[in-house]
Amino acid sequence: MAVRIFVGESMSFRTIGYLDEALEQTSWDSETGGADKMKAIDEYAVEASMSKVWGSEALFATADDAVQAFGGAGFSAEYPAEKIYRDCRINRIFEGTNEINRLLIAGTFLKRCGGTEGHPLAAAGTATLQLPEDSLLATVALAKARALKVIALAQAEHGPKILDNQEAAAHISNLLLELYAMESAVVRAGKMAASGHRWAALARDMAEVYAQEAWNRVQSGARMLAGELASGEALDTLLAELLAMHAPVPVPLSTLRNRIAQALIDQGRYPIA
């Protein structure tokens, strides 16, 4: 639950930061001020959709864990978990269902970026950030290489028609969601370490847990998208290329989870403020 909170915060902070920076370049004093501000906001529609989809699904999963932690009492209105679980379900429906947002994410990304260029996810700028170790950034880079390889193939061979295959569009969106979430958490953890933040070690543990597990989801998602794009020898070749790519070194997630859990138990709450 804490890992989800940290990653969700990181995505939200990043998205809001993009919007703030864009809006600072506009002014209501201009004759086109309103249109300029709407254009600046629209520029980050993909990031906003990713934050909404990922955040609403993480919220529901966390609420579900809360009900499970309460046991039978989780279904009782006398305890908070029941109301949280019931109320948070609507988030995956309103403000655009998550299914529609997934189509928006895939369609807008492919339209603006040609699959691989012109978007923060595809940029190498995060590589300049220095973490105490480079394993986390390496994990993100490896995941990004796999995901963008098959997304670029979808764009090159199918173009906009790939969106007619909603299964393929969902795979593209899920890959982008994982990349945005991974990168946001890892970069935030690096910035916390660089600034000497008191919870930097905890942040790194949470980013490491998410990155390791997300890499496996990216690997699986890339293979499933490949199955929508090719068949026969072409599919065999693509899968072999994906398999030949480097993979991050596994880490003992049980150790990291124990440290995270102990920090929360010691504090009696999610401590990062």
Image: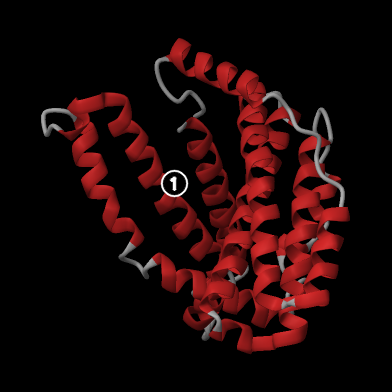
**Residue 29 seen anywhere in this rendered image of the structure:** no
Residue 177: x percent and y percent?
Answer: 58, 58
Q: Is residue 68 above or below residue 150?
A: above
User: Looking at the image, which is closer to me, 22 or 44?
Assistant: 44
User: Looking at the image, which is closer to me, 106 or 121?
Assistant: 106
Q: Secondary structure at mark 1?
A: helix
The local crowd at label 1, few if under 14, some if 14 to 19, many if 20 or more residues have their Cα within 10 Å, is: some
Q: Is residue 257 left or right of residue 143?
A: left
Q: Residue at the top extreme?
A: 266
User: Looking at the image, which is closer to me, 40 or 129?
Assistant: 129
Q: Is residue 2 above or below residue 41?
A: above
Q: Is residue 191 left or right of residue 178?
A: right
Disc 1 marks a residue whose amino acid type is: Ala
Q: Quadrant of residue 151?
A: bottom right
Q: Residue at the front extreme?
A: 232
- Looking at the rendered structure, the number of numbered marks drawn on it comes to 1
Q: Which residue is mark 1?
A: 58
Q: Is residue 188 above or below residue 54?
A: above
Q: Is residue 121 left or right of residue 203?
A: right
**Residue 256 seen anywhere in this rendered image of the structure:** yes
Q: Quadrant of residue 213?
A: top right
Q: Residue at x 67, y 29 (%)?
A: 204
Residue 183: x percent and y percent?
Answer: 68, 48
